[in-house]
Image (tube, rainbow, N blue to C red):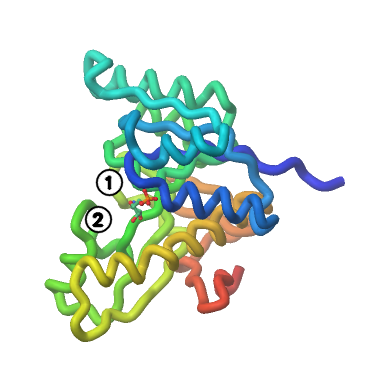
Amino acid sequence: MTAAPITIAVLASGRGSNLQALLDAIASGALDARIAGVFSDKPTCGAIAIARAHGLHAVAIRPRECTDRAAHDEALFSEIAAVQPDLIVCAGYMRIIGAAALRRFEGRMINIHPSLLPRYPGLDTHARALAAGDAEHGASVHAVIPELDAGPLLAQVRIPVLAGDDAETLSRRLLPREHALLVATARLFAQRRVQLHAGHALLDGHRLPAPLQLDAANHLIGA
Ligand code: GRF
């Protein structure tokens, strides 16, 4: 018997290109999953527009509609709970998620971050990699824990920094690789091969000694 496709909820605040990459992968058969809803703090963001254009369930709650940060988390994550996701993908969700919401979805939430974590958690990652003179840059998928961009790393993709790069060219070159990384990592969840714990990630029941690396053919080496 084939297992049912996993159910994914996407949390996003921005243009939604990672959401689009997941939708494209599902449409092409590369990812056996269903997007059960797109959730946001910004009703006018691109991700919500993409969701609506695809007829997906889309919920945006502005922080100012809620009394405080915890109430916003509670409102949005109750909406997420209603679709019973197997996996929550944070793809450019620009708010810090409180511990109560994280506990509710422990082991089921990942984030894609545009740097080779643990280098450059937070914002302006491309500019910071350039300012440091790094020879390579990249993106990481990690489990979400209360500390920002600090959860156990699952997978990364690396690109070289080229002479003459600025933050714009670097981010533009990285973005399609981020998309491939997210799809390849989501596929491991769809295959039910990953388990997330607060301190570490398991692949096929074994602790990952280091994040999986995406190769040029979009395979995660060693997975
Ligand atoms: C991506 O660079 C992602 O890594 C970061 O925010 C950006 C979101 O882009 N966390 P998009 O909204 O998916 O286009």
Q: Position of residue 27 (x, y in %)?
A: 65, 51
Q: Residues within 10 Å of mark 2 (few under 14, many from 20)?
A: some
**Residue 207: mark in rendering:** none
Secondary structure beneath dot 1 equals: loop
Residue at image point 68% right, 50% down: 32
Query: Camera-side residue: 68 or 100?
Result: 68
Residue at image point 32% right, 60% down: 114
| Furthest-front residue in this view | 53
Q: Quadrant of residue 167?
A: bottom left
Contact check, label 1 and label 2, Cβ < 8 Å: yes
211 in relation to 165, above or below: above
Q: Amino acid at mark 2?
A: Pro
| Residue 138 relative to residue 38: left or right | left
| Residue on which disc 1 sits | 148
74 in relation to 23, above or below: above
Residue at image point 40% right, 53% down: 112
| Residue on which disc 2 sits | 121
